[in-house]
Image (tube, rainbow, N blue to C red):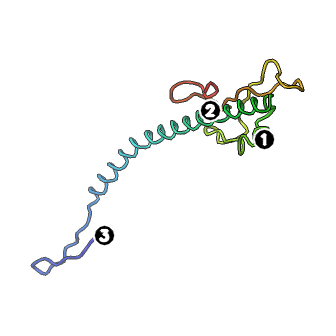
Amino acid sequence: MAASIANGNGVNRQHGFTLLELVVVVTVMVVLATLVVPLFQNVLQQAKEAALKDTLFKMRDSIDKYTLDKEEAPQTLEDLVQAKYLREVPVDPITGRNDTWEVELEEQPTSRNGQRGIINVYSGAEGVSSSGKPYREF
């Protein structure tokens, strides 16, 4: 925004930014943005991976507690919710969905009814983490 100022001769002069100044400022902002955006994306990805590890730890702990308490492994993740070991089946932070979990079943059933139950859970996300480890191996 230019301001009109009278100088000593009574002539009005416009003060403001020149086109060159504006181009320099915009260029500096673009350069900074190209440096900051990849860093932000990397931090965001690492946060998702940390959340995935924490979610898997809690789900595996719930499976273990259910198995010890009920003397049989849960048949589905929904069994953990119905028995109040989890409030809900959590969302996989990488896929953004709660139906992509992959479960590992017992080789030999331990339940009285002879059905194999869940002994472990993994992310169903494709790809690898920032450390190069596949999400399915977390």
Question: Sequence order check: which comes first, mark 2 or mark 1?
Answer: 2
- Furthest residue to the front? 69
Residue found at x 88% / y 23%:
114
Q: Marks 3 and 2: CB-CB under 8 Å?
A: no
Q: Which mark is residue 57?
A: 2
Contact check, label 2 and label 1, Cβ < 8 Å: no
The amino acid type, in three-letter code, at marker 3 is: Met
Q: List the residue tagged with mark 1.
A: 83
Number of other residues with Cα within 10 Å of mark 3, as a class: few under 14, some 14 to 19, many 20 or more? few
Closest to the camera, between mark 2 and mark 1, is: 1
Helix, strand or loop at mark 1: loop
37 left or right of 89 in image: left
Q: Nearer the viewer, mark 3 or mark 2?
A: 2
Q: Is residue 43 left or right of residue 88?
A: left
The residue at 30%/57% (across/down) is 22
Which residue is located at x 52 percent, y 37 percent? 45
Image x and y of residue 46, in percent: 51, 36
Whichever of labels 1 and 3 marks the residue nearer the N terminus, that label is 3
Image x and y of residue 83, in percent: 78, 41
Image quarter in which the C terminus is found: top right
Circle count? 3
Residue picked out by circle 3? 1
Which element is circle 2 on?
helix
Q: Amino acid at mark 1?
A: Ala
Residue at the extreme top of the image, as rendered: 108
Mark 3 residue element:
loop
Above/below status of 19 relative to 29: below
- From the top left corner, tell me how far across and down residue 108 is, in percent: 81, 18
Q: CA distance from mark 3 to mark 2?
A: 57 Å
